[in-house]
Every structure is written in structure tokens, then in C-alpha cells.
Amino acid sequence: MKQILSPYNTQLKHLAKLVKSAKYRRECRQTVLEGAHLLDALLQTGARPQQVYVAADRLDDGEIQGLLARLAQEDVTAVGGGLLAKASALSDGGGLLALAEIPAAAAPPQNGDCVVLERIQDPGNIGTILRSAAAAGVKNVVLGCDCADVWSPKVLRAAMGAHFLLGLYPDTDLAQWLPLYREPLRVTALDESAQSLYALDLRRLCGWLFGNEGSGVSDEARRAAAGSVVIPMAGATESLNVAMAATVCLFEQMRQRL
């Protein structure tokens, strides 16, 4: 097993820069998986990491040992002296960081179920929506150019492995793509024409578009939609967090199709 003992090691510097910089991740087409759970999720799909870095004092951890047993020895590097934590956004990186390739982006689908995200900035919201989409059986997620980086470590942690179960289409020009999408597109919006979520027939293929945390869906995107949807709420509550709203909509869709 290879070892890193120097804080000036170029591999550690590379990892730290990938964690911090979306531009660098795009240039290198690489990202960092923090912790054993994300590595396990990647391995379950049959994909392999490019390299795995393990804190030397965690090599005896049972969960980590189980993961390392599924990897070739040359794909694992032990990192000593608490150095691995300095490359991670987490306090200790979970004792394990994996270097993974970002898949080449394909053209977004023109039919079938999908989730479309417009100008969503919070990584936790994007990760939660990915996780809910995967759990609700929606396989494709299209992200507009103004969304936070879907391959950032924060989004990866929030999605809990959903990245590896979905078709992801980041940096999509929605103005060009939306006219090509053939299924009915629904948006959540508080307007007079909006229909109750629970009055809709969601058994057929469709797309769901969710917008910015503060300003919601843009007028341009709303014009591309087949109609607006409102989630009925009790009391004086005005709205839900976008990730929660997406989860409610997607699971109502799944409920109707079961």
C-alpha cells in the first residue's frame, strides 16, 4: 500500500483544490467522495474510484477494511499524521476520501420522467432533491446553468449516493432545451391558475420543474410548463423549502403509479 507522510504532497493539494473549487472540478473532470458511505455507493454500481486515500489511524476500522478488500492494493493510499482531514470539507473526512471521475455530460433527454432544477443555489437542497428523485423512481435530473455544482462534495454528501443512480445533466441551457422536451412539464407556483397537487393525474410521464429558493421559477420557464401546481397546506404556512416541495410532489406521483 502506498503512503503519504508529507503535508506538501501534490496529491493532497489536488484533493483539497477539488473540494473547494467547482471550476477546478470541471477542468479535471474529477470530484472527491468523502466518507465510506459514498465509496460504497459508487462500488455498488460497478464503477471504481481512481484512487482511495485512507487515514493511517483508520486502517483498522471494520467498515473501511471491508471497502478496501473490494479494491486493488495499488488503488489505495494511506495518509499519516492527520493530513487527510486538511484536504476535506469535513472535520475528519470520515477517515476516507475517494477520487472519482465526473462522467462526461450527455445531451439531456427529450422524453420520459425527469426533474428540472432552475437557479437552485443551496447544495443541500440539490442533494436532497437528487435523493428524493432516485427514491421516487425518477431517473433523470436536468440542472440549469445557474444551479450550484451538482458534483460538489456538499451535494454529494446530501444526496447520499443518489448521483450514481441517476442520469445527471448539469449546465443545461434551459431556454434551448425546454422547447425540445416532449412530456408535460409541471411547476410548483403560487398563482391563481395553479391546481392542487392532489387533484392531478400523475400516472403518465411528465417533468417537474423546481426553481430558485427565493424567487421560484422564472417567467420564461413557467411559460414552457403545461400548468402550475400548488401543494395544499394547513394554517398560515405560505410555502415549503424547495427540496421538501419536490419530495412531496415526487412521492405523490409515485403513490399514484404504485
Image (cartoon, grey):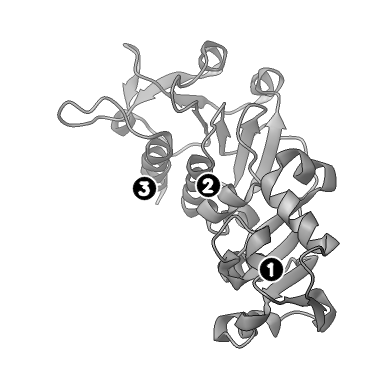
**Which residue is located at x 15 percent, y 29 percent?**
235
Report how far apart the C-alphas of labels 1 and 3 lie in the structure: 47 Å
Q: Secondary structure at mark 3?
A: helix
Q: Position of residue 224 (x, y in %)?
A: 56, 16
Marker disc for residue 137: none
Dot 3 crowding, Cα within 10 Å, few <14, some 14–19, many 20+? few
Residue drawn where x is 80% and y is 65% of the image: 50
The residue carrying mark 2 is 127
Residue to which mark 3 is pinned: 255
* Visible residue check, residue 109: no
Which sits earlier in the primary sequence, circle 1 or circle 3?
Answer: 1
- What's the mark number on residue 83? 1
The amino acid type of the residue labelled 3 equals Arg
Residue type, mark 2 in image: Gly
Q: Secondary structure at mark 1?
A: loop
Whether residue 220 appears in this view of the structure is yes
Q: Is residue 75 above or below residue 179?
A: below
